[in-house]
Image: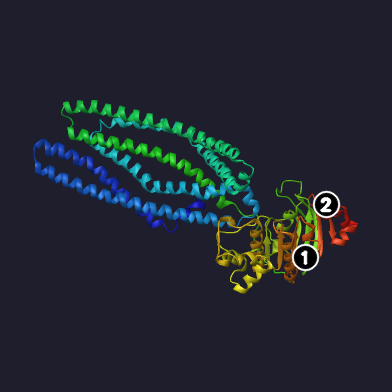
Amino acid sequence: MKKIVKYLRGSWALIVLAPLLMIVEVLCDLMQPTLMADIIDVGVASGEIANVWLTGGRMLGVALLGILGGAGCTILSAKASFDCGARLRQGMFDKIQTFSFAEIDTLQTSSLITRLTNDVTLLQMALRMMMVMLVRAPLTCIGGLIMAIAISPRLSLIFVVAIPVLAVAVTAIALKTFPMFAKMQQKIDRVNTVMRENLLGVRVVKAFVGQERERRRFSLANEDLMNWSMQAMNRMVLMWPVINAVMNVSIVALIWYGGNLVNTGDLEIGKIMAFMTYLMQVLSSLMMAVMMMLNFSRAKVAVDRCAEVLSTEPSIRDPHNPQRPENFAVTFDHVNFSYNPDDPEYVLKDITFTARPGQRVGIIGNTGSGKSTLVSLIPRLYEVTSGAVRIGGVDVRDMDMDTLRRHIGVVLQESLLFSGDIESNLRWGGGDCPGEELERALEDAQAMEFVSKLPDGVQNTVEQRGKNFSGGQKQRLSIARTFAKNPDILILDDATSAVDTETEAKLQQALRRRVGKGVTFIIAQRVSAIADADLILVMEDGAIVGSGTHQELIRSNEDYRGIVASQWGEEAIA
């Protein structure tokens, strides 16, 4: 809760004022039965109409005051809960931005989405209920008991039996039910996972006519959630027969015992009616308490899940005394890496090489050989398990992460564009760079040809995930975005897989012009993309099995010769 409470700051005035207004409403509700008893026992019994009107006017005034108190509490509690929910959601989002890929892999994307939406909403509802029901229920219960005892201590013996019976029954049912709510949230995570995978992969689903398979997957996840929800609700439903039974028996006991007191002259009819109202208020407040238990139990699960995000410390942090490199030479010094630190099987094994400023480094190998993992260690998207990655002789772990990543441009395998327009996407990389630089980036990325034909040019709309562009167009726009950043270290992770060979050749020419004093890493499946690189790394099963220029590898490396022969034919290695 310490992680959550700080997000209440800024709403303390509302959080204090809302319950005070609720106290006003409760006090007004508690006054009404007594005033009603006065009308019956004094005004009606004696025939004093003036007293009836006067007391009725007081009841109306008290009712209006109660309405103002209740409405004010509702408005202020809603404002406070929504404000706190917005701050908590923003705080969790900011925290997630500090996570490395390792934390995101552990917590899972779909679960993080659920925590930012569903769980925060549950907390908002709990906070709102706390400011309303957590004040109203106990005050009404205690106030009703006091007023009922003041009317007739003997009739109040009904509470001595009713309240313990309710408490025992509700507690027994609740202890069996509350652990199921944590399972329900996990089932919601699963539903979100299936839904997210289906929406993101909708093209693949339709291409493979997999709609029926996806319907079955979602149906299973959805029914699983429904079944757990029904199990929890079925147990909670057992409370209502118990509550209704206690309430009805209490009313029968009140009428029977109270009627005897009226017959003996020990109690007036008006007080019997007032006592019945207080009885209903007390038992209703206990029902409210049950509802609070239900909501707070779900909110407790949500609190734990949100607190887990806020308590998770990123495994990759900035050093206390960051250093700056003198140049941008990239060195891998006996690097080993595993996604799970406890796993003895490394994904990358003893990676050692140096890329000097101005060099273009090609990386090639079979799928799953560790190419993408290798380059992800340069901007510290993951932390090395052992060994060191150095830039200009400085270990990347000794560099400020923002500074490090500002000097690095990455084009990932999946070309992701953000909704907006082309220019806003380019400025993700280029920031406030002039328009001429953006145009040059588009030209070098071979994207100006199709951008210039669009109705609005660089102002043309980019739909969610760039779905209004082809795969090749998205790749070229992603490359242009990185070119606009003009990074000192450029990483292209299979970034030209969706473009034709002619366009790829033009891109290679632009890359040679842009290398300058930095280093360019090109991960490719096609030999043509890296054949003229200054250094080519051949990877197999997480290790470098060959390094050198194209001609050197043709002469010395069997793996590379096999790749070239499969793409260019045997005559290429003759």
**SS state under label 2:** helix
Q: Hey, what amino acid is under mark 1?
A: Arg
Spot occupied by residue 121 in the image (x, y as percentages of width and height):
46, 48
Asked whether, in this view, residue 32 is left or right of residue 390, the answer is left
Asked whether, in this view, residue 52 is left or right of residue 232, the answer is left
Q: Quadrant of residue 389?
A: bottom right
Asked whether, in this view, residue 164 is left or right of residue 119, the answer is left
**SS state under label 1:** strand
Q: CA distance from mark 1 to mark 2?
A: 24 Å
Q: Hey, what amino acid is under mark 2?
A: Ser
Residue drawn 76% across the image and 46% down it: 345
Q: Which residue is mark 2?
A: 566
Count of numbered circles on the image:
2
Camera-near label (1 vs 2) is 2
Colour mode of the rendering: rainbow
Q: Quadrant of residue 139?
A: top left
Spot occupied by residue 374 in the image (x, y as percentages of width and height):
74, 56
Spot occupied by residue 483 in the image (x, y as percentages of width and height):
67, 67
Of the two numbered discs 1 and 2 on the same chain, state the one appearing first in sequence: 1
Asked whether, in this view, residue 363 is left or right of residue 178, the answer is right
Q: Which residue is mark 1?
A: 360
Task: Report crowding for label 1: few under 14, some 14 to 19, many 20 or more residues within 10 A (C-alpha).
Answer: many
The answer to whether residue 318 of the structure is visible from this angle is no
Residue drawn 60% across the image and 38% down it: 213
Instruction: Identify which residue, 270 or 199, lies in the foreground.
Output: 199
Residue drawn 38% across the image and 49% down it: 131
